[in-house]
């Protein structure tokens, strides 16, 4: 992973602070470290072949053009609001709750099936950032757990791993919106609390499902929830200011936050560089 020059796409507001945090985490060793990562736009690329890449929500095709169009209309209305630098956080949180709630209702009303998920992923333009698979392998070899915290859809994230990586990782858990299907494979509801882009936090850890349970891995997971909470050094990866809340509820000693700024860079860079320890621009790889 060494030898990759990312200086032209990286921004660090306080170099000394970052260096001190890196040194502290190294001294403590891998047994104290965990990685908490967002999925869409963080582990996945924002742009794919010159066009906006798809998220775990947007790639989904219900097989019902009317409901697909309704979900697209919601995206076109709410997405600019999600990244607006002028809307207060309390107001923006309510808007995100509206958006996610309406979208989930449309998925149910439109008769989404489990089979449609596999077909949607196979036809999708969703791609992992350069270096993500190697990073997961690096962490798995060292028994360092990865918690994927996503406001997307857990069932789709698992299918993306299955189809795009063709393997699972015994150290990976997913906290995301999980679907409940009836015996005919039709979506009937969602499990637990709604997770949107601004309310992700470590209190939702109890919802985390080891990926291997769904992908058929026979190996056990590295950490149960209690022992993960004892890992008090955190590498946090996200593309939204709200992702910084993913470590809320975790009494960490040292946290390095990495922000991937994908959209509206000119207007958002000032707030991102103050909030994150390091910011990466323009779909930078994760070799760092």
Image (cartoon, rainbow, N blue to C red):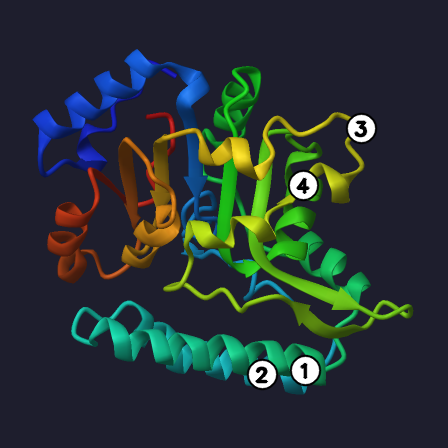
Q: Quadrant of residue 198?
A: bottom left
Q: Which residue is mark 1?
A: 65
Q: Sequence-wise, which precedes: disc 4 or disc 2?
A: 2
Q: Spatial distance from mark 3 to mark 1, Cα to Cα?
A: 39 Å
Residue at point 23%, 61% (across, down): 264
Camera-near label (2 vs 3) is: 3
Work out whether mark 3 precedes mark 1 in sequence or the reverse, and give the earlier one: 1
Q: Is residue 72 above or below residue 230?
A: below
Q: CA distance from mark 3 to mark 4?
A: 11 Å
On the image, the x and y values in percent for residue 142 come to: 52, 16
Tell me the crowding category of disc 1: few under 14, some 14 to 19, or many 20 or more residues within 10 angstroms, Cα based: few
Quadrant of the frame with the C terminus: top left
Q: Where does label 4 land, which residue? A: 211
In the rendered image, the quadrant that contains the N terminus is top left
Marks 2 & 1, CB-CB < 8 Å contact: yes
Query: In the rendered image of this protein, does residue 166 appear above or below residue 20?
Result: below
Q: Are marks 4 and 2 in contact (CB under 8 Å)?
A: no
Residue sitting at 14 percent across and 58 percent down?
A: 266
Q: Secondary structure at mark 2?
A: helix
User: Marks 2 and 3, how far apart in space?
Assistant: 40 Å
Give the foreground label among 4 and 1.
Answer: 4
In space, the residues marked 4 and 2 are separated at their CA atoms by 31 Å
Mark 3 closeness class: few <14, some 14–19, many ≥20 residues within 10 Å:
few
- In this picture, is 255 found above or below 45? above
Location of residue 189 in the rendering, given as x and y in whole percent from the top left corner:
71, 74
User: Which sits earlier in the primary sequence, circle 3 or circle 4?
Assistant: 4
* Residue hosting label 2: 69
The residue that disc 3 covers is: 218
Residue at 35%, 39% (x, y): give it: 236
Where disc 1 sits, the SS reads helix
């Amino acid at each position: 992973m060494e030898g990759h020059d990312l200086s032209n796409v990286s921004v660090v507001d306080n170099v000394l602070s970052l260096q001190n945090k890196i040194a502290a985490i190294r001294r403590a060793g891998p047994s104290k470290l965990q990685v908490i990562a967002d999925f869409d736009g963080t582990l996945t690329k924002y742009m794919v072949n010159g066009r906006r890449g798809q998220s775990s929500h947007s790639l989904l095709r219900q097989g019902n053009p009317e409901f697909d169009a309704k979900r697209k209309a919601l995206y076109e209305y709410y997405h600019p609001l999600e990244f607006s630098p002028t809307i207060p956080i309390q107001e923006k949180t309510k808007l995100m709750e509206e958006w996610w709630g309406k979208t989930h209702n449309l998925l149910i009303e439109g008769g989404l099936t489990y089979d449609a998920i596999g077909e949607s992923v196979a036809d999708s333009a969703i791609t992992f950032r350069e270096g993500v698979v190697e990073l997961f392998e690096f962490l798995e070899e060292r028994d360092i757990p990865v918690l994927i915290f996503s406001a997307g859809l857990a069932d789709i994230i698992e299918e993306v791993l299955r189809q795009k990586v063709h393997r699972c990782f015994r150290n990976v858990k997913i906290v995301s919106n999980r679907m409940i299907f009836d015996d005919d494979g039709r979506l009937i509801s969602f499990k637990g609390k709604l997770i949107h882009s601004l309310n992700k936090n470590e209190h939702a850890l109890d919802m985390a499902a080891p990926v291997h349970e769904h992908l058929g891995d026979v190996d056990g997971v590295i950490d149960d929830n209690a022992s993960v909470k004892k890992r008090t050094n955190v590498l946090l990866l996200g593309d939204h200011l709200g992702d910084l809340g993913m470590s809320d509820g975790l009494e960490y000693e040292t946290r390095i936050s990495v922000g991937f700024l994908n959209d509206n860079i000119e207007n958002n860079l000032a707030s991102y560089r103050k909030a994150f320890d390091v910011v990466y621009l323009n779909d930078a790889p994760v070799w760092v």
